[in-house]
Image: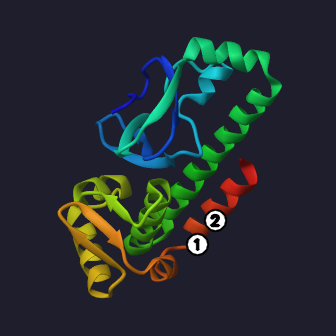
Amino acid sequence: MLLEASEEVEYVYFPHDGMLSLLAVMRDGKAIETATVGREGVVGGMAGLGLHRSLVRVVVQLPMTASRIAASHFRKAVSASEALRTLCINYNEVLLTQARITAACNALHPVEARFCRWLLQSADRAAGDTVALTQELLAEMLGVRRTSVTEVAGKMQLEGVITYSRGVIRIVDRAALERLSCECYQTLVEHEATLI
């Protein structure tokens, strides 16, 4: 865990690779992913605009490296740069768009399509076709039972779309994975391209 919801944001992180998940946390401790951040983004960027506490739990999902700056120094840099302020606002809109689409996706689309969307997003952040993800983690991120993920992963493996072994998923047929995904993956890609 990189940051817990309601904790003070001490550092702003700029990932070079890997993936972070932003999770909405309920009072009973259950959490579900609302957005992901990779090398295109920043975690804690709103600290530059005066938000001192995290509103989400931030968890490292894929091995990563990142640069960081103290939030207090980042605030000074943002206050001195209109361009940096604009980047913070635009990237916050990217995260809000992800959260909106993820919420709609979780409510409207079957687990198989959501599994494909999430795997495509993860592969994009990993910059490759192999992603280290356990079924337990996938179940938590998708807000479903582990058995649902087991069924979907098994079916996809039988169809030759992925291989899955000991917490490592390898995409064998990306085109098929994109066809099986809901519209949300492509929507996220398109929105991100227009906002960053």
Residue farthest to the left?
Answer: 166
Name the residue tied to disc 2: 187
The location of residue 103, given as percent across then percent down, is 52, 55
Name the residue tied to disc 1: 183
The location of residue 45, given as percent across then percent down, is 60, 29
Q: Quadrant of residue 80?
A: top right
Q: Quadrant of residue 39?
A: top right
Pointer 1 and pointer 2: residues touching (CB < 8 Å)? Answer: yes
Q: Residues within 10 Å of mark 2 (few under 14, many from 20)?
A: some
The kind of residue on which mark 1 rests is Glu
Taking the spot 80% from the left edge, 30% from the top edge, the residue there is: 83
The kind of residue on which mark 2 rests is Thr
157 up-or-down from 121: above or below: below
Q: Is residue 55 visible?
A: no
Q: Residues within 10 Å of mark 1 (few under 14, many from 20)?
A: some
How far apart are the two marked residues, 1 and 2, measured between alpha carbons?
A: 6 Å
Residue farthest to the bottom?
Answer: 159
Taking the spot 69% from the left edge, 32% from the top edge, the residue there is: 88
The location of residue 37, given as percent across then percent down, is 51, 45
* Disc 1, SS: loop
Taking the spot 44% from the left edge, 55% from the top edge, the residue there is: 126
30 up-or-down from 154: above or below: above
Q: Is residue 163 visible?
A: yes
Q: Quadrant of the N terminus?
A: top left
Q: Quadrant of residue 133?
A: bottom left
Is residue 51 toward the left or the right of residue 24 in the image? right
Taking the spot 47% from the left edge, 34% from the top edge, the residue there is: 66
Which mark is on residue 28?
none
Type of colouring:
rainbow
* Disc 2, SS: helix
